[in-house]
Amino acid sequence: MQTMKKTEHKFRPWMAAAVLLALLAGLGWFTQTGTLWTWDDLHRLLDLPMETAALPAGEEPSAAVTFLDVGQGDAVLLQSGGQSCLVDTGHVTAAQDLLREMHQQDVQALDYLVLTHPDADHIGGALSVLRQFPVGEILVSSADIDPEASGWQDDILWEAQSQGIPVTAVQAGETFPLGEGTITILLADYPSGGGTNDRSVCLRFAAGSFSFLDTGDAEQKAEAELVRLYGEQLRSTVMKAGHHGSSTSNSRALLQAVQPQAVGISCGAGNDYGHPHRETLETLEAVGAQVFRTDQLGTFTITWDAEGLHLPDEEAYDEPAAA
Ligand SMILES: [Zn+2]
């Protein structure tokens, strides 16, 4: 494992928020209202979209992002503080690979299963996952709970219902605690007028100084909306490349806002789409991101702890079998 030093003097939205909190607390005292401003008040007042874990100063959490090799599809395992969230489940033809990889990562249960959008290469393994692992809650973009509108698979909903697993249609701004951090929904069911890709749930996990961004298969219209809504607040340590590294996603504007240190691309070796596209790799290089690919490494993990970011040692990985 390589170790990358944490970036010093990095802009942290919570620092600005803390200063504002102090000012507002002072104002509350000055006006003799007796108001005690809480963190929640501040978020409501300023409409702050990002959540940061409440860790003691100077302490860093542990977190891991594992890009599970499901060939041409997405399945990303996010873990922190003993809790797990799986974002997408690959294609149904890779379901057995997915289950094996999850067992290899010692997954016992999922606190959340996020299905970013109802395309086959994202929800195909969901039924198998639900039958193999206890799942706390399923998060979907709002269109997905209307079978008539989206082609959302009835059998996944049926299985969730029969097990009593809540299925939540998420909305931008909602937050979900995960281990030592928080998942914030940035965008969901964005009506770009295009296909299902732009309706992807886009989420950001933040814990201490670490953050991870996953935009599913969101393409450039949804990415533009993310940049418009959040700007530099999108900055994230690690990012999953949008839409398997397609050039229809991964716009320069988004990547310049995110400034990722490491980017994982989930795609199958020799896939029919030519993913990842050359333009995407050039953009990633231009913003200085280190790139890791499931088609080259198979399953790989990026971790964060008190020492900073730990990237995969590429030489330690065997070539995966062709998809
Ligand atoms: Zn996809």
Image (cartoon, rainbow, N blue to C red):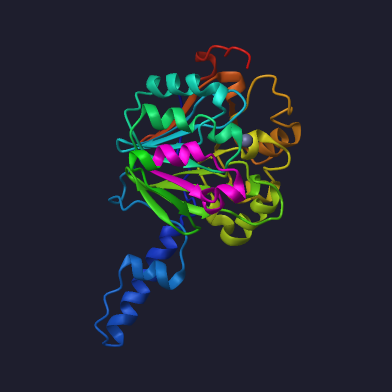
Question: Which quadrant of the figure shows ligand 1?
Answer: top right
Residue 285 shows in the view: yes
Work out whether 137 lies above or below 294: below
Q: Given the current orientation, which residue lies at the most extreme left position?
A: 34
> Image quadrant for the C terminus?
top right
Dominant SS type (magenta): helix
Question: Is 236 left or right of 270, judged from the image as shown?
Answer: left
Residue 153 lies, in percent from the top left, at: 54, 39
| Residue 148 magenta-highlighted | yes
Q: Residue at x 27, y 80 (%)?
A: 35
Q: Give how far across and how far down residue 235 sits, in percent.
A: 54, 49
Residue at image location 57% in from the left, 44% down from the top: 215
Front one among 286 and 204 = 204
Q: Is residue 101 above or below residue 111?
A: above
The image shows residue 16, relative to residue 285, as above or below, that is: below
Q: Closest to the observer: 279 or 274?
A: 274
Q: Residue at x 30, y 73 (%)?
A: 37
In the image, the segment drawn in magenta is: 137-160
Which quadrant of the structure image shows residue 246? top right
Give x and y (percent) for residue 70: 55, 24
Instruction: Compare residues 76 and 51 and report the one nearer the observer.
Output: 76
Q: How far from the left and from the top, in percent, is residue 159?
A: 41, 37
